Image (cartoon, rainbow, N blue to C red):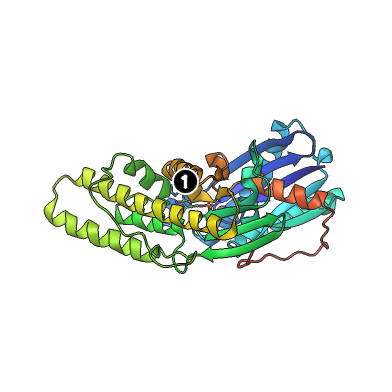
Amino acid sequence: MRVLGIETSCDETGIAIYASDGGLLAHHLYSQVALHAEYGGVVPELAARDHLNRAVPLIQQTLTAAQLNWSDINGVAYTAGPGLIGALLVGAALGRSLAWAAGIPAIGVHHLEGHLLAAHLESPAPAFPFVALLVSGGHTQLIAVHDLGKYQLLGESLDDAAGEAFDKTAKVLGLPYPGGALLAQLATRGDPNRYRFPRPMTDRPGLDFSFSGLKTHTLTAWREEQLTRTDNEQMRADIARAFEEAVVETLIIKCRRALAQTGLTRLVLAGGVSANQRLRERMQLAIAAVGGETFYPRAEFCTDNGAMIAYAGWLRLCAGQLEPLSFQVHPRWAL
Ligand code: KG4
Ligand code: ZN
């Protein structure tokens, strides 16, 4: 079984081929970041139109890289939600049409399931069951993953997602959209002992998160410090560092709590924020200290990509899951 994966839920066109024989054969990504940067965020209509332009050439490129022809593909997986409706419709319509023309099955994949399973693209892959920390631009969730398709929500953000907080804080510090990764770069030059920001919702039981107050705290600190400090560049780095430390430590506290509560020992990091180097390093140490093991995919499979969709679709098609020719997308879709 060789599955072509198509990811178009937001602003990245991701295409990949995953096969029973050989695993991930090829993957390509086209990022629309430059297209949306001047608007300070993703413009849904532009995103959909750009997916339309990019997806077919990218499929051709991916087939060539895998040294395959279209006739070698036995199934198609596309992201069916959650995401931007226009962007989702491009991937879904394309995936369905290609599969129909070739007489092969197609399947709609849940974008968050793709993220949850992305660590399985690496070796060693985490065995089920595990706790997943899903930290992306739109979601911050702790999930007990018992098996493929058996997901139990343990806790989630009550307001901003961690990635959203990174991006909004980056904007406060004058970094361009999407600023999460740039803020992390800036933080490497910051003094970790200069400021201590709050660790929201860690002083009460439970596994929910809240990041909007931390974002406001950062804005206030930024405004107040500008009145007294003249070393603007270092101040930005110190604030970025304090913000990152606060998010990382909050996530660590909740992940340890989730492992203790479920009795599970494996933790999987997923979603764009799990590309954060400090989070990866500090989480690994903190989880090892309580006898657990941390897994995460390479950074390019933390953020949106086609490989995770091809893999999730491959698993489901191998399990014999079939869908009718008509298709639906789900801009909002609970796991
Ligand atoms: O999973 P993803 O690519 O898209 C969604 O499904 O939302 O996540 C994107 C998010 C953005 O908020 C981005 O700023 C954040 O992941 N991100 C990071 C880093 N790289 C990407 N946040 C912190 N540190 C990073 N290195
Ligand atoms: Zn995503």
Q: Quadrant of the C terminus?
A: bottom right
| Residue 52 seen from this side | no
Q: Residue at x 59, y 59 (%)?
A: 262
| Mark 1: C-beta under 8 Å from nearest atom of ligand 1 | no
Q: Amino acid at mark 1?
A: Met
Q: Position of residue 311 (x, y in %)?
A: 71, 46
Q: Residues within 10 Å of mark 1 (few under 14, many from 20)?
A: many
User: Foreground: 138 or 156?
Assistant: 156
Residue bearing mark 1: 283
Left or right: 327 as drawn, with respect to 139: right
Q: Secondary structure at mark 1?
A: helix
At a point 24% along the width and 62% down the height, the residue shown is 220
Q: Residue at x 26, y 43 (%)?
A: 191
Residue 318 locus on image (x, y percent): 82, 48
Task: Determine whether 28 is above or below 159 in the image.
Answer: above
Image height check: is 119 above or below 79?
above
Quadrant hosting residue 153:
bottom right
Height in image: 309 above or below 153? above
